[in-house]
């Protein structure tokens, strides 16, 4: 699915999913 086809609501969830997928240790850096 292309990001350009996402609705704003779906895009919000996608961003949160991407951030949660990263190791928390990497975020603290």
Image (spheres, grey):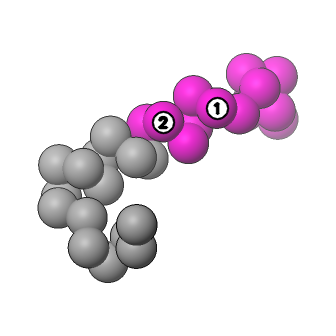
Residue 20 image offset from top left, x and y in percent: 57, 28
| Of residues 13 and 5, the one drawn nearer to the viewer in this rendering | 5
Which SS class for mark 1? helix
Q: Quadrant of the N terminus?
A: bottom left
Residue 5 image offset from top left, x and y in percent: 26, 73
| Of residues 28 and 15, the one drawn nearer to the viewer in this rendering | 15
Disc 2 target residue = 17
Q: What stretch is highlighted in magenta?
A: 16-29
* Outermost top residue: 24
Which SS class for mark 2? helix
* Outermost bottom residue: 4
Q: Is residue 29 above or below residue 1?
A: above
**Marks 2/1: CA–CA distance:** 6 Å
Q: Which residue is at a point 18% across and 58% down the rendered structure image?
A: 8
Residue 14 image offset from top left, x and y in percent: 40, 46
How many circles with numbers are drawn on the protein? 2
In this rendering, position of residue 22 left or right of residue 9: right
Q: Which residue is at a point 81% across and 33% down the rendered structure image?
A: 26
Q: Which residue is at a point 73% across and 21% down the rendered structure image?
A: 24
- Does residue 22 belong to the magenta stretch? yes
- Does residue 8 belong to the magenta stretch? no
Give the numbered dot on residue 5: none
Q: In this view, does 23 lie above or below 1?
A: above
Q: Main secondary structure of the magenta part?
A: helix
Determine contact: label 2, label 1, CB under 8 Å. yes
Disc 1 target residue = 21
Q: Which residue is at a point 57% across and 37% down the rendered structure image?
A: 19
């Amino acid at each position: 699915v292309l990001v350009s086809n996402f609705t704003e609501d779906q895009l919000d969830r996608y961003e949160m999913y991407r951030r949660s997928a990263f190791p928390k240790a990497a975020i603290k850096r």
